[in-house]
Amino acid sequence: MRMIQLLPEHQTPNHKPSKPTKEQLNNELNFHLAEKELMKLREEELISQEEFDQISKLNRQKFNPLLSPLMCDKP
C-alpha cells in the first residue's frame, strides 16, 4: 500500500456540519418508509427485481434522501 502526505492546501477545512432542515428530515423519513414497503412487495414477489430497482431509483429522485449515496451502490 502506498501512502502520501496531504499538504495543508489539499486538506479540507474543518467545517461544522449543518443541521438538516425539517423538509430534509421529512424526505428522509418518507424515503425510508417507501423503501420499506417496496422491499415487502419484492419479498412477496409481487414485483420483479427490475421493477424494484426502477421504483427505488424514482424514490431516490423524488425524496432526495441525505443518506442514499452511502447506502446504495446504484445511482
Image (spheres, grey):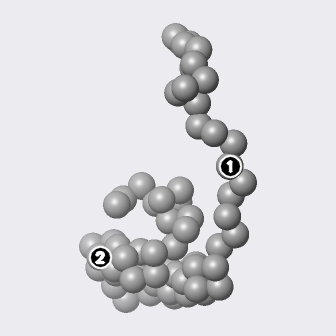
Q: Eyeballing the image, is 70 above or below 49?
A: above
Query: For the residue marked with disc 1, what is the amino acid?
Result: His
Q: Eyeballing the image, is 69 above or below 49?
A: above
Query: For the residue marked with disc 2, what is the amino acid?
Result: Gln
**Which residue matches tag 1?**
15
Mark sitting on residue 54: 2
Alpha carbons under labels 1 and 2: distance apart = 36 Å
Residue 42 sits in quarter: bottom left
Residue 14 location in percent, x, y? 69, 42
The secondary element bearing badge 2 is classed as helix
Residue 26 location in percent, x, y? 60, 86
Q: How many marks?
A: 2
> In this rendering, which labeled residue sits more in front, label 1 or label 2?
1
Q: Residue at x 63, y 39 (%)?
A: 13
Precedes in sequence: disc 1 or disc 2? 1
Q: Residues within 10 Å of mark 1 (few under 14, many from 20)?
A: few
Foreground pick, 4 / 18: 18
